[in-house]
Image (tube, helix red, strand yellow):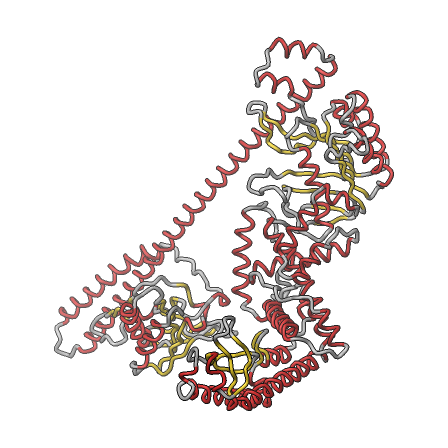
Amino acid sequence: MNEKVLKTLEYDKIIEMLAEKANSAPGKKLCRELVPSTDLEEIRKNQRHTADALRRLFRFGSTSFGNNKDISFSVRSLQIGSTLSIPELLNIAAMLDNVSRIKSYGRQDRHGDKAEDYSRAGNDSTTRGDARDKDSPNPRGGGPAEGGTPTDTLDEYFELLTPLTGLSTEIHRCILSEEEIADDASPKLKSIRRSMLQTNDKIHSQLMSMVSGSYRSYLQDAVITMRNNRYCIPIKAEYKGQVNGMIHDQSATGSTYFIEPAAVVELNNKLRELELEEKEEIGKILADLSAQAGTHTEELLNDQKVMTLLDFIFAKAELAMALNATEPIFNPDRYINIRKGRHPLLDRKKVVPIDIHLGRDFDLLVITGPNTGGKTVSLKTMGLLTLMGQAGLHIPAADRSELSIFTEVYADIGDEQSIEQSLSTFSSHMTRIVHILEHADADSLCLFDELGAGTDPTEGAALAIAILSHLHDRGIRTMATTHYSELKIYALSTSFVENACCEFNVETLRPTYRLLIGIPGKSNAFAISSKLGLPDEIINAAREQIGQEDKTFEDVISDLEQSRITIEKEQTEIAQYKERIRILQEQLQQKNDKIDQAKDRILREANEKARSILQEAKEIADETIRDFHKAGAGTDIRELEKKRQKVRDKIGEKNAHLSVSGSLKAPEKKTIDPRKLKKGDLVKIVSMGLQGTVSTLPDAKGGLFVQCGIIRTRTNVSDLVYAEEKSVTAPSPLKGAAGSGKIKMSKTMSISTEINLLGKTVDEALSELDKYLDDAYLAHLPSVRVVHGKGTGALRCAVHGHLKRLKYVQEYRLGEYGEGDSGVTIVTFK
């Protein structure tokens, strides 16, 4: 791709935006070297890399490659056996630490919490999709393949990384900073530094005894100082002969001499020897670390290469996220269809998206219209998005936008007249056009701004038509802007050539920046002049200067424009009607749902009432039968007959109620999907009329246990429905035959397996926790989850202290990874 067009279309500014997204210097360098490709397979691979990196950013957040520094010089030094300096070794360790983090980041697809990740990705997709076409697919690409395992073209790069954890750990163990080697780097270094410390102590001890003792009157100041890297004491000039030792320095005034007493000369000498030994031992340690690193030069170079490439790929994804860009579809047919495209250098909140297509129904597009209407922006948007797509970058456009492969993009945009070369505006334009005509072929995309401008309008229009015809005959995809009416007629009368215009509102004298393909643009000169106050007689005189054919053509354009506006208004009204119909349909559906719910509730209540009536009738009948059985020979027959009649009357009364209830249709049982059932769900056992909580998940045949108060019942998932959280009544198994009894089931049937204490004070939390644990224990829950958060740890300590005092608590522990970590406590009951 020629360098000139990259600057003309401002591709270099996009590259700078891309480089800012990279974290490391090598990554930024790779970004600045990015140029559009002409290999379709390479482009698709690069686009796939960007899409997969974008998907990871949305699912797992961003990561950093900041410690990926250029270590090629250090590696070459290792290859020839040189010893690296402390900063060089630290750079290698920092890069390896970064490699370890990036490799862990790359493994999240396979080892992370997939359910949570997909949920988060789905939420992001909803938010992101609002700014896009509603019919757009997932902008991230990739996603789960069959079996739930994500497919990702970046996996191979993450797998190529070798963290060399042992090497980085050893470097950090030995080197604490650029100025400090650890004492434990080697046994000998530790011994040397211990000796140095002891020697220092001896020197200070002796000098302090002198300073506070016999030499006190000789001292200028009662301090110990260093001169020439040796410990000295400051002696007044008049007493220098009284102190036996070596003079190392004199003050500027000559009143003080810095003397090393003879008593500590030997100790100072020993200290210097130890310092030399320390320096020598540090050299050995660095040499040993360098030798260890030297055995991994290939891995180090490979790590840096892969890290740089990943930094580059994720920079492309970060740019796509910033631009709200999508992956374009590439075709080999030289067809372009940009949907809702935006120029990436304009504010996306203000820029008006445009639709551009070229290469299928027509290969030459002529855009007309007034100045400042957006013609040049449309031209640059087409060219820049083509370059970005071929460079493997996502484009700021709606999903399903299509691009093609062009070996060259040529652009004649802007005025580049040169005083030194004696080139006028027209000459500079024509020079570039000649160059384009010489080099363009069928695989080129040509963009011309104000074609034929800068000279006589008649000749300029003729030249423009001839140039466009030449490009059209050669099958070159071309897009041009112009003011000439002759080019509008040329586009109308030539096959595979299409008109377009940038919409302009004459009433407000402002462009709308919408690109309308298929409609030639009006200059609107007379209308604009009239709105701005130019006298009517002048405008009428100007109209008379225009030929009848030109008037007729302008009238046709006006009619077309008016028809277009009318059609758009009608389409807007139709869309509004459709939206109202949709809202009414939703409201009707909601009403129907409410009616169905009310119907189900009425039927359920009727059936429960019928069951109660039957139970009561049965108990009355049983009581009567017992009375008959107890009757002896002397029993009054009339008394028995009265009891029998009483039973008949009650049964008749109950039958009347049953006939009413039986006439109602039984409610449909809403079955439960076993895959969606979770422990702790509130359910109702239909056959028993009992309500409880799910204790175990269904087995292969649907069998599971439900905790109904203090009773743990085995049933089948087909006999369950979801229940509302309320107390239920059930026939009492303890009631005697003399009557019908009902007991109130405890609310512990629906006790949750988790309590949330976040935001509460310690006193409030412990009070609520104590009551909850009592209910959970009575409900026979095996274990519960207490959410107290991390914070300062005060609430967690209070909860643990309370749990220690509860006799029915068997054990408690902090949550593990995936359970909430130290923000929750898992409590198990006895």
Q: Residue at x 61, y 58 (%)?
A: 55
Q: Is residue 346 visible?
A: yes
Residue at (23%, 68%) from the top-left corner? 620
Label tally? 0
Q: Position of residue 189 (x, y in %)?
A: 59, 87
Dividing the picture into quadrants, the one containing residue 611 is: bottom left
Left or right: residue 819 versus residue 438 is left
Question: Residue reaching furthest right?
Answer: 438
Q: Position of residue 173 (x, y in %)?
A: 58, 81
The correct choice, above or below, for 454 with respect to 771 in the image is above
When asked about the image quadrant of residue 66, the answer is bottom right
Residue in the foreground of this view, choosing between 191 and 214: 214
Front-most of residues 182 and 275: 275
Q: Is residue 444 above or below residue 809?
A: above
**Image coordinates for residue 73, horizontal then vertical, percent:** 73, 70
Q: Nearer the viewer, residue 732 or 118?
A: 118
Q: Nearer the viewer, residue 381 or 244?
A: 244
Location of residue 806 (image quadrant):
bottom left
Residue 153 in view here: no
Q: Quadrant of the C terminus?
A: bottom left
| Residue at the (50%, 41%) spot, across then down | 582
Question: Left of 293 or right of it: where is 475?
Answer: right
* 279 displayed left or right of 77: left
Relative vertical location of residue 290 with respect to residue 301 in this rendering, above or below: below
Compared across the picture, whether 258 is left or right of 310 comes to left
Picture coordinates of residue 225, whole percent (x, y): 49, 79
